[in-house]
Image: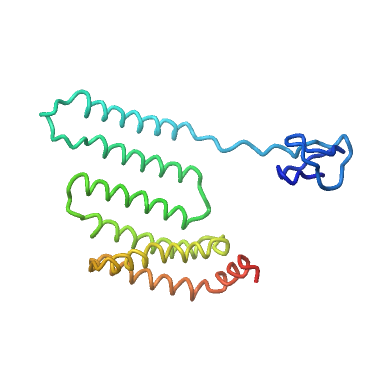
Amino acid sequence: MKQCPHCHIRVGGSGRYCPLCHTPLDGVPTPDDAPWFPPSPPPGRRMPLAMKVLVFLLLAGAFVCTGIDYLILEPGDLPRLHWSLAVWVCVAAALLLLRALFLGSHNAPKLLFQLLVGTALVAGFLDWFLGLGGVSYRFIIPILCSVTLVLNFLFAFVNRRFTENGLVYLLLNIAVGITPYIALTAMRTRPPLPWIICLLISVITFLGLVIFKGRDLRTELAKRLHL
């Protein structure tokens, strides 16, 4: 079949120009009775009814909380913290989690990183909103990072597609465990003990990936660098 160098579509028949942009076609013509376009891809996945109901309930509940916070309660009834903002942050995090689970990616490190970032942002917002004195920065987030590193290490041994995502495992290990410690040190801030433990877990799991999955990592590196 002929191919359009501009639209990058394959066109059947003996036509000389692309039917979309009228650019001259490249390639060998096919019989006139051949299909003009390749078969259409199957439709995307449809969200299950249960998930649609859950999304509706989450959004409806968030709007109800917003109405109570801004329209019903008087300024003297509760401290004016606008607690509905915290509800919206939690609902947004829940929707992102549902979306990640619905798409069902084979890239376990990417999914772990998305969950970690979303949970850390929610924890940091609630810490600031409720005035908890930095408990998320000192304890919650480094604990979440440590759990992510351990899960990332375990998934590397059960994921059959590790060779395709091996470098992503290593990059996640560095980004989650080593980068925050370097950033805190650069700001001349003494990292709390949970961050030090997270750094040690990062180094240990990094060495484990290199030692136990070194051959797969070299294969992927050679493939990506065309060595």
Q: Is residue 72 visible?
A: yes
Q: At 31% across and 41% down in the image, what residue appears? A: 90
In the image, taking residue 65 as reference, residue 168 lies left or right, namely: right
Residue 109 rendering spot, x and y as whole percentages: 46, 58
Residue 171 rendering spot, x and y as whole percentages: 46, 64
Q: Is residue 44 above or below residue 146?
A: above
Q: At 41% across and 43% down in the image, what residue appears? A: 96
Residue 1 rendering spot, x and y as whole percentages: 82, 44
Q: Which residue is situated farthest in the bottom direction here?
A: 211
In the image, taking residue 9 as reference, residue 175 lies left or right, namely: left
Q: At 18% across and 37% down in the image, what residue appears? A: 81
Front-lying residue, 168 or 186:
186
Q: Is residue 15 above or below residue 159?
A: above
Q: Is residue 93 above or below residue 189?
A: above
Front-lying residue, 16 or 57:
16
Front-lying residue, 15 or 24:
24
Q: Which residue is situated farthest in the right direction here?
A: 31
In the image, taking residue 52 as reference, residue 38 lies left or right, namely: right
Which quadrant of the structure image shows residue 85? top left
